[in-house]
Image (tube, rainbow, N blue to C red):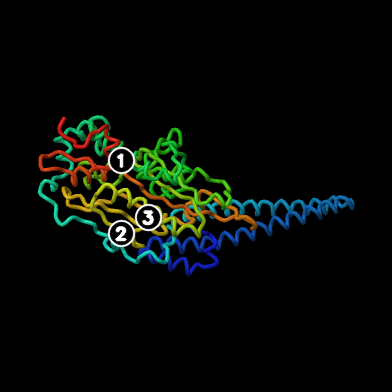
Amino acid sequence: MIDVRLLRTDPDGARAALARRHSADVLVQFDRAVEIESSVRDLQARRDGLRAEVNELSKQVGAKRRDGDAAGAEALQAQSRALGDEEKAVADQLDGVQAELRDLLLRIPNLPHPDAPDGADERENPVVKGPFLPAEFPDHQRVPHWETATALGILDNERATKISGAMFTMQRGAGATLARALCQYALDMNADAFEEVRPPSLVTTATLTATGQLPKFADDAYAIERDDLWCIPTAEVPLTSIYAGEVLDDAQLPIRLMAYTPCYRREAGSAGRDTRGMLRAHEFDKVEILAIATPAQGPDMLIELRDRAEALISGLGLPYRIIEICTGDMGQSHHRSFDIEVYAPGCDNWLEVSSVSWFSDYQARRGDIRFRTAGEKGTTIANTLNGSALAVPRVWASIVENYRQADGTVAVPQVLQRYMRGLTVIGPK
């Protein structure tokens, strides 16, 4: 969440930054938060004043009793009880107002970085690198991956639907091996600097709230209500909270983590949109890279994560481009963000395969992740960053389309062949 102190120290600056998100609702929420924050301070002052009066009266009651003035002491006690009741009523009112303020702060998005491009929606996201495309795509690559994969027996969504319902996928044979190979490739390529973690796939409400998924995106998450647990939508969620509530030393930063996990998303409202083949599914595999850094390390770390994600896609030999997300298309927690998109000739579309984002201190404030600088007093809230090193479904689909050969088989990208048990071409079963 944003720093609550901005509501009183720089409301105009924060409002101007949020206005770049091109959302009237966000500004309404922010203005309400400014109003409530002022009420919080007024109520706190009133409560503290009443407490001080009660304490003073208690001292006077003691003095009256020592002087033998029982009637005077009783009168002061009655006055103290009345003030105590008033103090309790004010404290209860304060609790309610503070809860409303916290709820608003959990919903107000992050402030965009000054260098983030202005724009109202995804149509204004600028291409910052590429596109890297071949001169042309032959006709045999203009076949949708679901047709090729079904013909080769490596994708069986019909039976996946029978097992689990709509929008679940199932890779078989070499298709399953290809999915696993992509994950191992992504882990191996980042093992030089990132610690591998295998976090839990189920997390608490507090953990999901720390990264910004709750309360705003509750409808997109799978809940296990009986146990107050949620299926993770991405490894970003558990990785971010590994150090929740802890104070790190600045010498430890940046901390670099990576994880392979399954990811679960209800995709509320997506029925009928990009649901064929591997384009959109409720469950998929992904390798995530994440960093916890100082604010000063944030800009360089963002570019490092972006470059690592790009290296994976480039290494696969896929046609791609990098776009920067404009202020009106940013996710709630994002401070600055890039997407890597791969062109799928069979779908005739650019597919987002990686999102790399810097969250400034927005997530770390929710998770209370701090660091201490040697020789300085106090602590500072850390910065978090993350990127999809490799999300399997759309990369898998892009490989099937871009590496489709004239005879209908699919060549295995060279960098993946060592993970494919010697398989260099995927043919029919």
**Distance CA(mark 2)–CA(mark 3):** 15 Å
Residue type, label 2: Ile
- Residue 257 at x, y = what percent? 45, 45
- For this orientation, the residue located farthest to the right is 67
| Towards the viewer: 306 or 369 | 306
Mark 1 or mark 2, earlier in chain: 1
Q: Nearer the viewer, mark 1 or mark 2?
A: 1
Q: Nearer the viewer, mark 1 or mark 3?
A: 1
Residue located at (27% from left, 53% from top): 341
Is disc 3 surrounded by few (<14), some (14 to 19) or many (20+) residues within 10 Å? some
Quadrant of the rendered image containing residue 233: top left
Mark 1 or mark 3, earlier in chain: 1
Q: Nearer the viewer, mark 2 or mark 3?
A: 2
| Towards the viewer: 233 or 223 | 233
**Distance CA(mark 1)–CA(mark 2):** 23 Å
Report whether 107 appears left or right of 309.
Answer: right
| Towards the viewer: 169 or 316 | 316
Mark 2 or mark 3, earlier in chain: 2
Residue behind mark 2 = 323
| Residue 415, numbered label | none
Is disc 1 surrounded by few (<14), some (14 to 19) or many (20+) residues within 10 Å? many
Residue behind mark 3 = 331
Q: Secondary structure at mark 2?
A: strand
- Residue 144 at x, y = what percent? 16, 45
Q: Secondary structure at mark 1?
A: helix
| Towards the viewer: 159 or 428 | 428
- Residue 4 at x, y = what percent? 53, 59
